[in-house]
Image (spheres, rainbow, N blue to C red):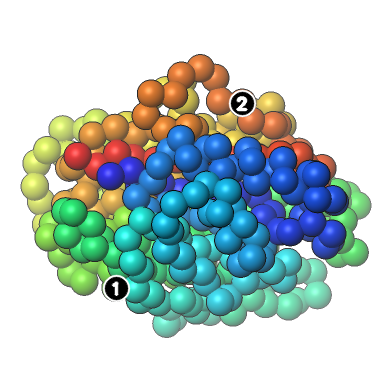
Amino acid sequence: MLLGTWNLENLYRPGGPFGPKDKAAYEAKLAALAGVVGALDPGVLGVQEVGEPEALADLLEAVGGTWHTALSALPDGRGIRVGVISRTPLEVLADTRAFPPRVRPVQSDDSGAVADGAGRGFLAVETVTEAGPLRVAVAHLKSKLLSYPGDRFFPRDEGERARYGAYALYRRAAEATALRALAEELLAGDGRARDVAVLGDLNDEVRAATTQIPLGPPGSEIGTPGFETPDKGDAARLWDVAPLIPIDRRYSRIDSGRRELIDHILTSHRLVHRVAEAGTGGGPGAEGVLRLPSVGADPAAHRSESGSDHAPVWVRIG
């Protein structure tokens, strides 16, 4: 089975303020996305930036076959949300944006306004695969791409840039803590006996502090001597599969010309030891350089381009 995650980048029908400007651009986007999903042939795929449920239905119609879908009912201010598509039926376990107890609201702008929950809901589902039950959480954490009052993407000065960078980091850290709390519910005390995966656009790289928070107890990382040595942390730990991705394809987005891996698959102990292969892009057997646009400070610049500015990240479970 192939398990993956993909930010579909503003999946809206045409004509609105965020999606493709016209029908031709929309159809080109759907065709590009459908080609990748068809090549991946995932059993379960977490998706981000679904702007309209109808647009996701259009995409799956273009892919063809039978799909089961679950979408968060908690989009952000632009209407984008996370979801899951699957070849097997899905049961929704949670749809939440709540920070865990003791995590206070965090400052979000110069006015002193606060965020008291994640900007976009986290969705948790369960499905039954040939290997048994699989629990999956999908998330899309606060972006590193900063926006400023008045719908600006460029700061007035360095002081404003620094402050809004800090506000974004506060929010992403609180959201990562909330995601870890949801993961603990799915693990239910023993990842050694449960297949659990956390999927999504975590909006920072592998070693970033906010990406590390959902992993749980440190130690036993892939590629270290501790990986094959059981310990008490295995029950609660999640493993980022990034070290299993070939180094020349270990990125999912290009930011200002620099490759970065900001989309992640985190797996429980029982699941990580059955990962046969991991990668980015078009799935097992795909070769060559990932063809991704380089994003800049203005996310709207890619609005009417086909495909997505992210590559899917996937694992094949043996």
Residue 291: which disc?
2
Dot 1: what SS? helix
Residue 154 drawn above or below residue 168: above
Q: Position of residue 85 (x, y in %)?
A: 44, 58
**In front here: 131 or 189?**
131
Between discs 2 and 1, the one toward the N terminus: 1
| In this picture, residue 21 sits left or right of residue 13 | right
Quadrant including the C terminus: top left
Give the residue type at disc 1.
Glu
Q: Residue at x 51, y 17 (%)?
A: 288
Cα distance in 3D space between marks 2 and 1:
37 Å
* Residue 182: % across, % down: 37, 70
Name the residue at 75% across, 76% down: 112
Image vertical order of residue 62 relative to residue 309, above or below: below
Q: Kindly identify the residue that appears in the image at 56 percent across and 54 percent down.
A: 61
What's the residue type where badge 2 is placed?
Arg
Q: Which residue is mark 1?
A: 185
Q: Nearer the viewer, residue 172 or 183?
A: 183
Q: Position of residue 266 (x, y in %)?
A: 34, 50
User: Please, what secondary structure does the residue beneath circle 2 have?
Assistant: loop
190 on left or right of 120: left
Query: Hey, which quadrant is residue 11 in on the image?
Result: bottom right
Residue extending furthest bottom?
A: 101
Q: Quadrant of residue 256?
A: top right
Query: Residue 119, located in which quarter of the rendered image?
Result: bottom right
